[in-house]
Image (spheres, grey):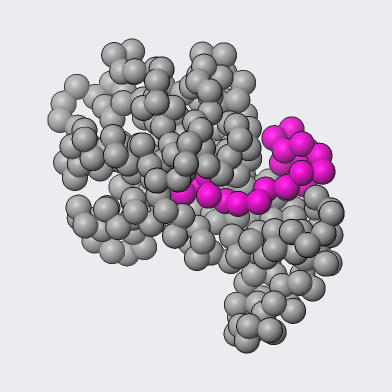
Amino acid sequence: MEEPTSGQPAVPSTVATAAWAATTGPQAQAQALGAAEALRHGTYWNAPQLPGHDGPLTLGPGERERLRLILAGKPLSRQTWLDAVDAHLRGRHINATPGERALDLREDVLDERPDVYLDIDDWLTAIAATGADNQWPDLDIDAVCRAAVKAFHIERQLTDDGLLPAGTRVWTYLAYDIATATSLAQSGFRLGFADGAMVGQILDAARANAGAVFADWAQFGASYAAARSSLHGSYPCDDVWREATGAVATLLADPTGPWTALEFPTGEPA
């Protein structure tokens, strides 16, 4: 489902930091994984409270619509929230998408070659062959091929925008799921679905999983921006693209932001 691509506000120049909450240590590292989502929704990256909100904790502007999209028509409840957190935390959400299938298939091909990149024609040929071998429906083959073409253009634009080194690739969109799970943990706290201990468990798992897949904030950011465009954008020049890449560029450059102040998490998957 595509997100709205018009009338979106410009990306703020900094992400909001709660002065009373931790800005160092493992929990802060984990919370920083959701910083692009916090920048997008105008929330603190390191605390569940909402900036300028003195009353009871509630959902922030745009959060209810985001949850509606994440839950895909399911009613908002503690159980549906838990299911969404679990799916994103484990990457089950992104693994079910044509885009991630296209990236996985490219990695399978490159595992058997000395190359670090795959030409789009070879990529599409490999998808067609794999689809035929595994008796995929034609609609599935077409969806994965279209996702590969989209990924090809996304990577070229990421390189042009200075967010992906030339000659490298995005090998997974998992950063989007990890960032979303981290952000959902804060939303769940505001909704009363989770206490601090449960949020801490979610953050620990997100931190471990991110550290097992990505090497640094730049890799994580490129994956996040690419996934946002693949899932919700039309072409890497629309409002979805500008918002996602703007958030990543801001976080990578902000001298007081979490992505420059904190080392990227390391660890084993939870």
Using the rendered image of the protein, determine whether residue 148 is visible from the camera's viewpoint. Answer: no
Residue 121's x, y, as percent? 84, 67
Q: Nearer the viewer, residue 101 or 45?
A: 101
In the figure, is residue 79 to the left or right of 34?
left
How many numbered badges does the structure rendering display? 0
Q: Is residue 238 above or below residue 14?
A: below
Q: Residue at x 40, y 49 (%)?
A: 89
- Residue interval drawn in magenta: 155-178
In the figure, is residue 158 to the left or right of 265?
right
Residue 40's x, y, as percent? 46, 35
Instruction: Choose top left, top right, bottom left or bottom right for residue 216.
Output: top right
Q: Nearer the viewer, residue 129 or 14?
A: 129
Using the rendered image of the protein, determine whether residue 28 is visible from the camera's viewpoint. Answer: yes
In the figure, is residue 17 to the left or right of 156?
left
Q: Residue at x 76, y 59 (%)?
A: 110
Q: Is residue 207 above or below residue 85?
A: above
* Magenta stretch holds residue 189: no
Q: Is residue 92 above or below residue 138?
A: above
Q: Residue at x 60, y 52 (%)?
A: 172
In the figure, is residue 142 to the left or right of 81?
right
Residue 7's x, y, as percent? 51, 42
Q: Residue at x 74, y 59 (%)?
A: 111
